[in-house]
Amino acid sequence: MAKPDAVTEALTRVLADSYALYFKTHAFHWNVTGPTFFSLHEMFAAQYNEVWTALDEIAERIRALGGTPPSGPSALGRYATIAEAEGNLEANAMVRELYAGNQAALKTIKAALAAAQKAGDEATADLLITRTEAHDKHAWMLKSTLAD
Ligand SMILES: [Fe+2]
């Protein structure tokens, strides 16, 4: 198998963090409790659906570049910087954890964007800028939920 180049390797890290954040957001959608249940349940759904759609675009970009995305969650997890949630958290702790997760995804995306720009790969850079906008928006909404 061909050795992955810097761009496909960086995109694999973006796919892995996006998947980890997708799953964590979906699990919090299931498990959130308390007086803010309904609004958080709905906001988490909007966010995990957005990230789920992006997973396909990121993986297909890896294929278009000649790479092969990992074929399962454990293989993908080896590339992730976002850890699974431990135990069941109270609602505000879930929001803080998802805010941190979006910031971690943004860091991984920024590194991939630098790799794409260095390689002159404008299409991948465009995808990564779109992902930056999406995670900036998710992070803004999460942070606004925590404001007094
Ligand atoms: Fe649901």
Image (tube, rainbow, N blue to C red):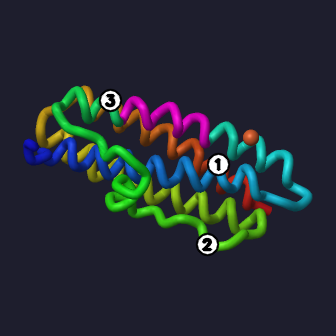
Identify the image quadrant of the C terminus. Answer: bottom right
Which residue, given by chain and number where applicable, does mark 2 sit on? 86
Q: CA distance from mark 1 to mark 3?
A: 22 Å
| Highlighted range, magenta | 48-58
Quadrant of the frame with the N terminus: top left
Is residue 52 on the magenta stretch? yes
Residue 60's label in the rendered image is: 3
Question: Tag 1's secondary structure?
Answer: helix
Side of 109 relative to 9 (left or right): right
Identify the residue at image location x=88%, y=61%.
Answer: 34
Cβ atoms at labels 2 and 1 below 8 Å apart: no
Task: Mark 2: give few (<14), some (14-19) or many (20+) Cα within 10 Å.
Answer: few
Q: Position of residue 16 (x, y in %)?
A: 39, 51
Q: Amino acid at mark 1?
A: His
Q: State which tag comes first along the sequence, 1 or 3.
A: 1
Q: What residue is drawn where x is 69% and y is 40%?
A: 45
Q: Residue at x 65, y 56 (%)?
A: 143
Disc 2 element? loop
